[in-house]
Amino acid sequence: MKIKLGLLYGGKSAEHEVSLLTARAVTQAINFGKFEVYPIFITQTGEWRKGNALIGPAETIEELQFGGGSNRPNNITKFLPVETTNTNIEEKEDNANLDVIFPLLHGPNGEDGTVQGLLEVLNLPYVGNGVLASAAGMDKVVMKQLFAQAGLSQVPYVHFIRKEWKDDQTELIRKMEESLKWPLFVKPANLGSSVGISKVSNRQELIKAVEIAFKYDRKIIVEQGIVAREIEMSVLGNDTPRCSVAGEVLPTKDFYDYEAKYEDGTTNYAIPAVVSPELLKKLEDAAIRAFKVLDCSGLVRADFFVSENEEVIINEVNTMPGFTPISMYPKLWMESGLSYSGLIEELIELAIERYEEKQQLEHSKDGE
């Protein structure tokens, strides 16, 4: 029998469009002979829509926005209504028939542990990282604090919340100018895909960049820029994760921004990256340490800076990297001998493996 797979995508996030691109790419690669695929679309206003089973790859983004199966809105049924009091038994039974969920959500309300928590409460197997890893991996400040505990090298940074900026902007700027060196990167703490990120070289640009970043999050992180190679590693597994070959990002722009990642295709990559065996070993060790300190499962893309003297400095991890045709995560596995469709199948297997292990846990104090 086919595995009933729910593809969950869209979402109330600035990365909504990225999620749609990812979902369409997955439908192009998945083996419909093994999986019965049900699209579950979250609109930008937070409405959940479950479409009829796809009979083949989604031809257009518009098809996915309508929930799949047909481009007619009347073929959509609610999966999890916003007003949960209206959820009837029939809908609940239909949802329970899904064997596993594949969340293809990026950013807040998607890869930050919120949806993962919902799926845990519903007792549904799902692909990727759990609540803790997702939440910690989404918040760049918490993530960096955990990396420090694991002894991973990082660039200097400063972080603050909106109220601190409003109360004492002058003192925060002084602190940044004293502890960091230009140029600086200003980022929302809880967002991905380079949305809201700015590179700045002076105080005026810094103030403007902070205001832009505050449009996306109440917490900001400001990192010191570094002259270094940008090397990425894909990690796959649960308790015994393994790494792909290394890949190097060769941006033609000033930095690897949203458009370079998803829209204009101008960024070049070296896959595999030209690295010595010693450097590759250091990258693998750091990627696995990052994976384990966050208690990750399924998949992670670990991003590093490599200095001229081959010091490995971790930048961040992405607990739900994109699966678009130009995304680094699947490219690295394809270069490592694992096809796109094979990668999807292994991720689903890992999700079911983790779920079945959790079902062995006792839920009473007497173990009965």
Image (cartoon, rainbow, N blue to C red):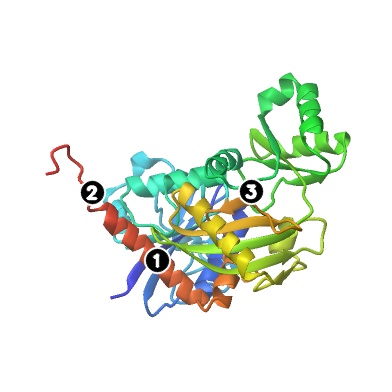
- Which residue is nearer to you in this view: 31 or 44? 31
Instruction: Give the amino acid type for the residue marked by disc 2 in the picture.
Output: Leu
Q: Is residue 121 left or right of residue 362?
A: right
Q: What is the secondary structure assignment of the residue under circle 1?
A: helix
Residue that badge 3 annotates:
14
- Which residue is nearer to you in this view: 182 or 162? 182
Q: Nearer the viewer, mark 3 or mark 1?
A: 1
What is the x, y in percent for residue 239?
Answer: 38, 58
Q: In terms of sequence position, does the residue under pointer 3 or pointer 2 come before the other? A: 3
Q: CA distance from mark 3 to mark 2?
A: 37 Å
Mark 1 residue crowding within 10 angstroms, few (<14) / some (14–19) / many (20+):
many
What residue is rendered at 41% in x and 53% in y?
78
What residue is rendered at 67% in x and 23% in y?
163
Q: What is the secondary structure assignment of the residue under circle 2?
A: loop
* Quadrant of res 22: bottom right
Looking at the image, the residue that sits furthest to the top is 167
The N terminus, quarter of image = bottom left
